[in-house]
Amino acid sequence: MQETAANARLGIFICVVAMACFACMDAMTKLVIQHYAPPQFLMIRYWAFAICAIIYVTRTVGLGVAMRSVRPGWQFVRSLILILEANVMAFGLAYLGLAEIHSIFAVYPLMATIMAAAILREPVGWRRRLAIVGGFAGALMIIKPGHDIFQPAAAIPLAAAALFATYHVVTRFVADHDRFETSFLLMAVIGALAITPLGIASWRPLSGEALGIIAMMSVLAIIGHLMLVKALAFAQASTLQPFNFFLLAWATLIGTTMFAERPDVLAVAGTILIVAAGLFTIWRERTIEAQE
């Protein structure tokens, strides 16, 4: 579908709603992480996601076509990185607030730019280098190293951001060889198979309330991913990318209203700096692509 102004607006709207689904899913994760290990509820989520992915590709390109990968090894690595990132992020929600963890996690586009330059040999000019420095300065303002209220747990979302940035770079690489449906299917199926042994090993009987929350988390994850797929049908990935930062906005809104989180002035300033640096980096990448 060709991207028109109307289609782009619709794609952006769908993307913003998808970010709301993911933020609500993280809020529910924060509720269950106090009583259940991440692999247990991630196993349920991933199997629901895998079933949905199989149905989706069967109805679009066909399961046989989607299963054919030019880079199966990299698809396997990519899927493992994402499931590890999901576990680390869920673990972090046991110690940090929604707004705080997503503020620090928001440095992942900057990390991805550094990795793309080092691994994919993508050029990075002085403007983006300056944006990267600014973004990490914002992260330090939130983490506050050397300060009395410094939390070692702040390193958890930084690790998750590094993993997600690595996933992003590997995805760029496999996208040049495999179709979208292949990456979508293998991400879900490999992730489900990988998390299952850990989920079974950490299994605890679920209360009725926990089962309901995890079921809703699974539904939100499926809706969110399908909405992102639909958004990409209306608008280009480069158009939608800046609006991924709405995940931080939704997380902050939910954190302040549902969990009574109150980020301090320095944390707010650091968050603004990270988002500004991320948006500038995305804008520079789009400008360079347009000039090539």
Image (cartoon, rainbow, N blue to C red):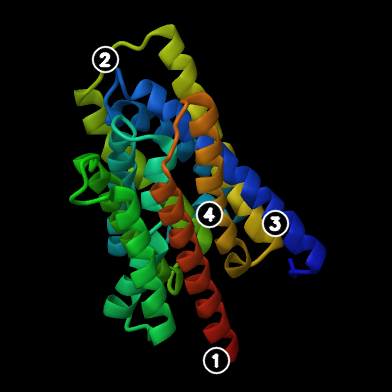
Query: Residue 265: image x %, image y %?
Result: 43, 47
Which is more N-terminal, label 3 or label 2?
A: 3
Which one is nearer the viewer's eye here, 175 or 66? 175
N-term-proximal mark, 3 vs 4: 3
Q: Is residue 91 left or right of residue 284?
A: left
Instruction: Indicate the quadrant containing the C terminus: top left, top right, bottom left or bottom right.
Output: bottom right
Q: Amino acid at mark 4?
A: Phe
Q: Nearer the viewer, mark 4 or mark 1?
A: 4
Query: What is the residue that sits farthest to the bottom in this orientation?
Result: 292
Q: CA distance from mark 1 to mark 2?
A: 54 Å
Which residue is drawn at the image coordinates 50% and 47% (left, top)? 248
In the image, what residue type sits under mark 1? Answer: Glu
Q: Nearer the viewer, mark 2 or mark 3?
A: 3
Residue that label 2 marks: 204
* Observer able to see residue 76: no
Residue 16 % position (x, y): 63, 49
**In the structure shown, which secondary structural element does the residue marked by tag 1 occupy?**
loop
Q: Is residue 86 above or below residue 5?
A: above
Q: Which residue is mark 3?
A: 11
Q: Which residue is mark 1?
A: 292
Query: Quick one: label 2, few (<14), some, or many (20+) residues within 10 Å?
Result: few
Which sits in the foreground, 275 or 199? Answer: 275
Q: Residue at x 50, y 39 (%)?
A: 251
Q: Residues within 10 Å of mark 4 (few under 14, many from 20)?
A: some
- Residue to which mark 4 is pinned: 245
**Which dot, 3 or 4, sits closer to the camera?**
4
Q: Is residue 273 visible?
A: yes
Residue in view at x 32 percent, y 79 percent: 117
Q: Residues within 10 Å of mark 1 (few under 14, many from 20)?
A: few
Amino acid type, label 3: Gly
Q: Amino acid at mark 2?
A: Arg
